[in-house]
Image: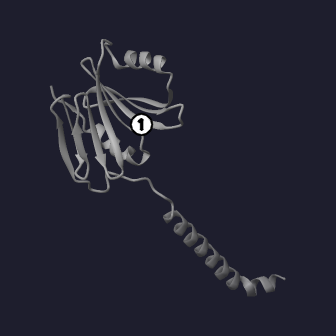
Amino acid sequence: MITNLKKNLPVLLIASTLVLILVVFIGAKNNSRVNKPLDLESKPINLKEFKSSNLNFSIQIPSEFSAQERSNSVEISSSNGKLYIDRNGTNFENLKDYLDDLDRRNKTIIVKDESLVINSYDSRIRLLEFSTGETQKEFVIFVDGIVYYLFTNDETLYNFLDQIAQSFRYTP
């Protein structure tokens, strides 16, 4: 039996090596098929500045988007959908108290709520769910008693919303 094993050892080694190479090749091929999220930083996007004359802010938007200003809001449109920016005044001294009061009154389901700072302003990124089943991603930015909402209900625009919100500048 040991003699048969010695005779077949080269065949077993070659077969084992081929199986190992096949497993590695199939694993690498399957990993390349995994859907990867859109990485905005790796794909150059041409931007243009939008400066609101009524609402005292500026942002960078992709050049294929258009912005239309209204008295208390801005609508940012693309062929894929729309994003919005609203502005509200408040007597609250900070964003946390403002949102705590608003959420208590509106009874909105908050799926995600994280604090962050955008250009030195206290901000929150939130994902809300409404009773209709619709979801909304929003950035809420607090500047000197003014609350800016940047939001969309269109999931395909979430990455653009992230990029636009990070470019927000208050321009009194």
Name the residue at the bottom extreme.
7
Residue at 80%, 86% in the rendered image = 4
Q: Label 1's element? A: strand
Q: How many labels sit on residues?
A: 1
Residue 110: percent from left, percent from top: 49, 28
Residue 37: percent from left, percent from top: 43, 53
Q: Is residue 114 left or right of residue 167?
A: right
Q: Nearer the viewer, residue 24 or 5?
A: 24
Name the residue at the front extreme.
70
Residue 43: percent from left, percent from top: 30, 57
Quadrant placement of the C terminus? top left
Name the residue at the right extreme.
1
Q: Name the residue beneath numbered marker 1.
A: 137
Residue at 26%, 17% in the rendered image = 145
- Quarter holding residue 161: top left
Residue 92: percent from left, percent from top: 33, 13
- Quarter holding residue 5: bottom right
Residue at 55%, 72% in the rendered image = 25
Q: Amino acid at mark 1?
A: Lys
How did the renderer colour the structure? one colour
Q: Is residue 9 left or right of residue 144?
A: right
Quadrant placement of the N terminus? bottom right
Q: Nearer the viewer, residue 103 or 17?
A: 103
Residue at 42%, 30% in the rendered image = 114
Q: Nearer the viewer, residue 6 or 71?
A: 71
Q: Is residue 55 left or right of residue 42?
A: left
10 Å crowding of disc 1: few (<14), some (14-19), many (20+): many
